[in-house]
Image (spheres, coloured by chain):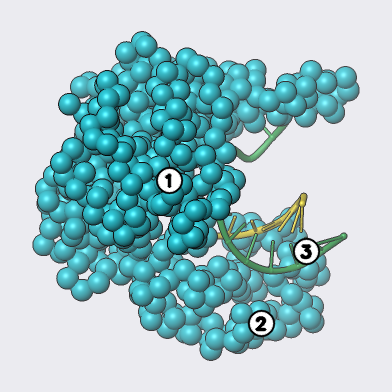
Chain colours: A cyan, B yellow, C green
Amino acid sequence: MSAIAFLAADPDGYALIDLRDQLTGNSLQPVSSVSREELAGFVAETEARHSPRWAMLRTTPWMQPLAAAGVFLAKAYILSLAQRILHRSPLSTKPLDDFNLEQPTQGREWANQDALFSAPVTGESLAELIAMYLAQRDALPQEPDARRRLELLIHAESVGAVIACEMEEAGLPWDEAGHRALLREQLGERVSDYGRPPKLAAKAQQLAEALGSPGLNPDSPQEMLRALHKAGFAVGSVRAWELEQIKHPLITEVLEYKKLSRLASTHGDAWLDQWVENGRFHPHYVLGTVISGRWAASGGGALQLPHSIRQVVRAPAGSTFVVADGRQLEPRILAAISHDQQLQKAGQQDDLYQWLLDAKLVASRDEAKLGMLSVIYGGGGGASGSVGAALTRSFPTAMRFVEQAAQAGEQGGGVRSFLGRGCPPADEQWLQAQRATSDEASQRAADSAARARGRFTRNFVVQATAAEWALVWMGHARHLIHQAGWSRSCRQVFFVHDEIVFECPTELAGQLQELIRHAAMLAGRSLFGQASPRFPVSVAISGNYADAK
DNA sequence: TAGGTCACG
DNA sequence: ACGTACGTGACCTAG
C-alpha cells in the first residue's frame, strides 16, 4: 500500500500533516498539527513508518529545515511544479491554470505570531492543497504510456526540487583563503567595492598610454573600440574571440585586462563576502522557470562557474569529489527519441564522435562534434554542409525528427519533450507578425522570426529530454545512495545540466562511482524502457573540482 | 532599461 | 544565396 502525506500550513499553528492511502484517498491517521520544532521529528518518523510521497505546494518553507535536520524524504510531489508541467503539457487532458513560480506568493498574517517570518504562502491550506492535487490527477491522461510519462516527469521534477534544497543546505566546499590569495596575487590589495583594485587600475592606465588614448576606460566597449581604431586596429568589435585573431602584444594586453576585470567584478572579494560562508558556496537553484526544464540559479552565478576559478573548489580533508557527467548526452538523447537505429549503434561506443570518425563519416573528431551540435541547434553547418550531408545520409531518421520539430516551430506550433514537457505554441503577437508581411522588411523580419523559432523548437525536443534524463539520473543516484546507507556521508553538492558533483569520504569514492554509472543505466530504462540506448557517464575522482575535466 | 560582453552547459 | 546555431545569469556602460 502506498501512502501520500500532504504537508500544509496550519492557520492556527505551523504545519498540518494529512496521511492518506494514495489509491482510496482514505485517511490513515487523524490530521496532525505540528509545531516548527516538532516538524523534523514528525516527518522522519512518518517517513520511517510509511515512506509516503510527500506532497507540498512548494519546497519553501518546509524543505530547508528538514534538509538542515538531515531528514530524508524518498518521494515527493511538488504541486506548484506539477501544475506548471500539466498546464503546458500537450499530454494533459484537462486545462489547468498556470502557477506563477516567478512571483513569490505573499505571506499573510498568522494567528501565531511566532510563525510570521517563516509563514507559508497564501493558498496553502490543506483543503486547497488536496483540491489542487485531485485536479492534477484528473488532468493526467488515461492512456497508460502517456500517463506513465507525465507521472515520471512530475516525480522526477519533484525529487529534483528536494535535491536542490539539499544542495543549497550542503553548499559546495570552497577554499575561501585560497580564493582570497588568488585575488591578492592577480589584483593586488583589496580596495573599496567600487574602485578598481591596484593591479587592475595600473593595467588600465598602461593600456590607455600604450593605445594613445589618455583617460580611456577599458571597461567601456565603445571607448575601447574607438581607442583600438585610433591605434590602427581595424576590428569590428572588442569581443575576445575577435581580438584573439590578432597576434599583437597590445591586443594581448587588452585581453589580459578583460580577463582580470572579469575576475574582479564577477568573482572578486564582494562575491566571496556574499556567497561563501564557513568554507562553502551556497547558491540558490531555481526550478520550473526555464522552458526546457533545465534549472536556473539565482545569485552567485552557480551554473556559470568559470573553469579558471574551480581550483578553489576543494573537498575537506578525508573527503573527495566524485564528478560525473553524461557523455555526449544530447546526441544520445536524439538517438533515443527519434528511434534512429544507426545513431543508437554509434552510441554503443563510449565515444560517439569517435565512431563517426572510424566510420569515415567525418574527417576529424571535432568535425563530428560540431556537425552533431549543428544538427541539434539548427545551425548553418547542419544539413547544408558536407558534414551535414554525411550525417543526413547516415542518420536519416534522426534528421527527419529534428526537421519536423523545426517545421512545427516555424509554423507557430508547439512541441514536447519525450516525457511530455510542453513548449507552448507561438503567442498571438508572433502569429500576427507572421501575417503582417505587407512590405519587404516585415516579410524578412517574419521569416527570420520563423527560422529562429524553428531552431528553438528543434533544440527544445532534445534539450528538454536531456534535462529529463539528468533529473531521473540524479533521482536514481540519490535513491541508490540512500539504499546503500550512505545518505549521511555522500552528499550531492553541485549540478549543472548534465553533470553532478558528489562529496564523499575518500574510501567510498570507488563504490560511489559504480553506483552513479548504475544510476545512469537505470535512468535510460526509466525513460526509454529495456531497449534504451546506452548512456555512458564519465567520472572523475578528485579533491579539486578543477582536475575533474 | 537596453545593449554589449562573457561565463557555463 | 542566405543566415553565422540552442539555452541561461551577471556585470558594466550608455542614455
The front one of A424 and A116 is A116
Question: Is residue A275 left or right of A346 when viewed as pictured?
Answer: right
Query: In the image, what residue occupies the spot 66% across and 82% down?
Result: A195
Question: Which image quadrant for residue A78?
Answer: top left
Q: What type is the residue that disc 3 sits on?
A: Gln
Question: Which image quadrant for residue A430?
Answer: top right
Q: Which residue is mark 2?
A: A195
C-alpha distance separating marks 2 and 1: 47 Å
Q: Chain of mark 1?
A: A
Among the two numbered marks 2 and 3 on one chain, the one whose residue lies closer to the N terminus:
2
Q: Which residue is mark 3?
A: A222
Which x, y percent locates residue A424?
58, 25
Please name which of the two marks, 2 or 1, marks the residue nearer to the observer. Answer: 1
Q: Is A294 drawn above or below residue A446 in the view shown?
A: below
Query: In the image, what residue occupies the spot 11% across and 62% down?
Result: A507
Please name which of the two marks, 3 or 1, marks the residue nearer to the observer. Answer: 1
Among the two numbered marks 2 and 1 on one chain, the one whose residue lies closer to the N terminus:
1
Contact check, label 2 and label 1, Cβ < 8 Å: no
Q: What type is the residue that disc 2 sits on?
A: Gly
| Discs 2 and 3 share one subunit | yes
Among the two numbered marks 3 and 1 on one chain, the one whose residue lies closer to the N terminus:
1
Question: Is residue A179 left or right of A227 when viewed as pictured?
Answer: left
Query: In the image, what residue occupies the spot 15% across and 41% down?
Result: A49
For mark 3, does the 10 Å Cα neighbourhood hold few (<14), some (14 to 19), or many (20 or more) residues? few
Element at label 2: loop
Which x, y percent locates residue A148?
32, 20
The front one of A418 and A366 is A418
Q: How many marks?
A: 3
Q: What type is the residue that disc 1 sits on?
A: Ala
Query: In the image, what residue occupies the spot 36% across and 75% down?
Result: A278
Q: Which residue is mark 1?
A: A9
